[in-house]
Amino acid sequence: MNRMGGTAREPAGLSLKRVHKSYGAHEVLKDISLDIQGGEFVVFVGPSGCGKSTLLRLIAGLEDITAGDVYISDTDVTERDPSDRGIAMVFQTYALYPHMTVAENMGFGLRAARRPRTEIEQKVRQAAEVLRLTDYLDRRPGQLSGGQRQRVAIGRAIVRDPDVFLFDEPLSNLDAELRVGMRIEIARLHQELRNTMIYVTHDQTEAMTLADRIVVLRDGRIEQIGTPSQLYDDPDNVFVAGFIGSPKMNFFKAVVQGADRLRLGETELPCPRTDAAIAGPVILGLRPEDLRVAGPEEPGFPMEVKFSEFLGGTTYVYGEIPGGTGCTVELERSRQARPGTILTLTADIADMRLFDVEGMRIR
Amino acid sequence: MIEANPSDEAAPPTPRRSRKGDWMGLVYVLPAIALVVVFFLVPLGMTVWMSVHDWPLMGNPRWIGLDNYQRLWGDGSFWQALGFTVLYTLAATVGLMSVAFALALMVQSEGRATAFYRTAYFLPVVTGFASASLLWAWLSNVDSGLFSPAAQMLGMTERRVNILAEFTPAFWSVTIMVIWKMAGFFMVIIMSGLQAIPADYQEAARIDGAGWFQRFRWITLPLVRQPFALALILCVAGSMLAFDQFYIILNGGPSNQTVTAVYKIFNESFVSFRLGYGAALSVVLLLILLALSVIQLRLLREKGADK
């Protein structure tokens, strides 16, 4: 038994096999295949309209699947009712029943399953203790703060003791400070429960901090699956490279000349690839923290400073390189960069990422 | 050094009141107040005034104090009319609320055909009660109507039967007409309440394993309580004031068994021209309606819930 009174069973895995979803002629999910290990915390991330919430709702059974299969614990649940899939879901709007108390909300699933009252009370109390909601059990959702409501929504999911937890942008209605607190709370819960969790967000910071693995979606397709560090350090394409990381990666048009030189405007830089086959136009990706002011003898490219943001521990400087391309660089806090100043920037060869003109990574 | 403003912790300051704002507010509500005064309070005062007089159609009214109310107490035909009105109100309200709720559930979702069905169900509402009653009187006519031949064809009766000649079929015929005519109106009120329930609630309940009936009982019904209360109060008030349909279709028959309270008031005031007595009956009916509305509001008031 875990602290919630749930049975200590093997966490359930989940598989999506060639999943498609269309609304009429509009295809919102295209050929999604994915294997999630039991106990994994997987985050679906992507811009608005990429299909991440729809994918979660397909897993939940709230939307009918157009083609493909959903497996939970090696059982095909594609045609099953949401209540028979062994899942619990936390909604963006909390979806707490306003006319019920916190205890009634949390025990709703067990009440619907006609469990004995003593069992419902015991499980609700256990979940409330874990979520520090014991003092609020008799209140109604309208009498709680946003963070407390979110905890009740999570509590309602926990009480059902599901195989898989689904979170649909659960923190997007909270203010910045509460969001950080709840993020830590959810991470702590995952460590404690060890259940499989699938979490949808458009916030790449949430994705990076919570996920064992991140699934990046765009236009209904999976762009890349990997651990946060894999996606950050080794993105497959310009989209993933730009989406993961804040501030986002800088992209510059460059030309590979010969086998080992990279021309960026008037500047020649060493090329991370020594392969004559890639000669020609490329996109050079450089993260703001990988750029630095070049030493006196180092080759570098000029950037005219437009403005800077002092963030306490660090400073982000925004500017333009010749040709008008925007560029962001992270400097140490002591460094001053006034608007109009020209900085000569460079980066280590190991931090340069090359992409072809189609945006695909050149490794 | 900057210190925290101590007033941050204190109670919020009293909002400044502007005298100009007060006057403007009064101007804004003046049309509404004028309407209420002219079309409700003045007629109500006049009715009460009439009720303490012997007020013939011709001649001078004569002050008689509470005599009309005393007479009313012993007037069996008024209590019979009131009893019938309560019976009709019960039947019509249960029928209307059930049908309207069912219709609202059917047409609440956005679909290609739902707009058509909403219009179709609402259409009888725009027919006047008098027109609908005339239509129903014709349909119920034993010779030229449709109901009697239809009942005969379906084998429900051996020969054509005048369904308006006996109390029970006549009563239900009128009640069904009212349900047909008014269900669309209450459907719209209840539907607005159903549509205001976020879809997330139903989805969360589905995931929680609640079946259709459990969701209806535990989620839909409590959350649609306020519009339902409005529909119920309007329905009860409307039914307690029923007149046209019983006057036009049944003319109070058979054997004066379908004379409603308002029908009785009409007879006293405009057939027997006892305007003072009719006014006293109106005042009593108003008080009964007021009491019924208060009871319904209290019973259906939400206890501390907020959406």
Image (cartoon, coloured by chain):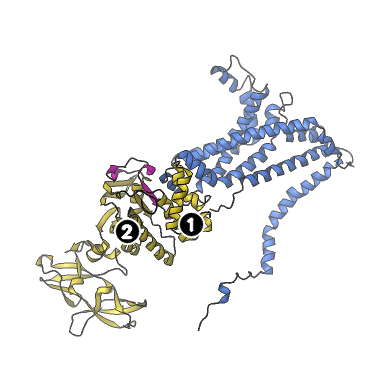
> Residue A47 appears at what percent x and percent y?
34, 59
**Is residue B196 located in the magenta-colored stretch of the structure?**
no
Sequence-first disc among 1 and 2: 2
State the residue position of label 1.
A134
| Above-or-below relation of B179 to A162 | above
Q: CA distance from mark 1 to mark 2?
A: 36 Å
> Residue B108 appears at what percent x and percent y?
49, 42
**The quarter of the displayed image where residue B283 is located:** top right
Residue A160 vs residue B198, the one in the foreground: A160
Q: Which chain is blue?
A: B
Q: Residue at x 25, y 58 (%)?
A: A224
> Residue A148 appears at what percent x and percent y?
47, 59
Q: Report the side of A11 relative to A254 (left or right).
A: right
The answer for which chain carries disc 2 is A
State the residue position of label 2.
A46
| Above-or-below relation of A106 to B6 | above
Which amino acid, by three-letter code, is at mark 2?
A: Gly
The answer for which chain carries disc 1 is A
Residue A94 seen in render: no
Determine the residue located farthest toward the top in the rendered image: B158
Q: Helix or strand or loop: what does disc 2 sit on?
A: loop
Where does the magenta region start and end? A64-92
Residue B120 vs residue A309, the one in the foreground: A309
Q: Residue at x 33, y 40 (%)?
A: A79
Residue A238 vs residue B236, the one in the foreground: B236
Q: Which chain is yellow?
A: A
**Is residue A80 located in the magenta-colored stretch of the structure?**
yes
